[in-house]
Amino acid sequence: MSMNDFLSYRLQQREKEEKTLLIGGRHFQQFIFYAYAIVEEDHLHWIRNNQATLRAELYRGLCDALKSGDTTH
């Protein structure tokens, strides 16, 4: 389970659970801020560690465009 999935689950209101997280006021806002920062940091970490995969997809798209004749030069 990713951090994003966990946080999405925790932020949903449920009938049979207390709403202590959602009535936290400024603490809730701070929690949301830190949660967003954690998810973004995780996303950037994934991008940093998967550059080979990302670049391969970029070049694959370039090769596909060249094969289909989708060029302006």
Image (cartoon, rainbow, N blue to C red):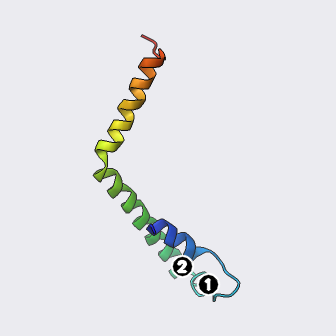
Q: Residue at x 65, y 78 (%)?
A: 13
Residue 10 is situated, as x and y percent measured from the top left of the image, at 55, 77
Q: Measuring from the top left, give residue 69's x and y in whole percent.
A: 47, 14
Type of residue at label 1? Ile
- Closer-to-camera residue (51/23): 51
The foreground one among 7 and 52 is: 52
Could you tell me residue 42's position as x and y percent?
37, 62
The structure residue drawn at horizontal position 39% and vertical position 57%, both measured from the top left corner, is 43
Q: Is residue 33 left or right of residue 52?
A: right
- The amino acid beneath tag 2 is Phe
The vertical placement of 28 against 60, above or below, is: below
Quadrant in the picture for residue 3: bottom left
In the image, residue 42 above or below residue 58: below
* Pick the front one: 27 or 41: 41
Q: How many marks?
A: 2
As helix, strand or loop, the secondary structure at mark 1 comes to loop
State the mark number for residue 28.
2
10 Å crowding of disc 2: few (<14), some (14-19), many (20+): some
Which residue is identified by label 1? 23
Q: Quadrant of the C terminus?
A: top left
Q: Residue at x 28, y 53 (%)?
A: 49
Crowd rating for badge 1 (residues with CA inside 10 Å; few <14, some 14–19, many 20+): few
**Circles 2 and 1: CB distance less than 8 Å?**
yes
Q: CA distance from mark 2 to mark 1?
A: 7 Å
The image quadrant that residue 23 belongs to is bottom right
Could you tell me which secondary element the residue under label 2 belongs to? helix
Q: Examine the rendered structure and indicate whether residue 62 appears above or below residue 20.
A: above
N-terminal-most mark, 2 or 1: 1
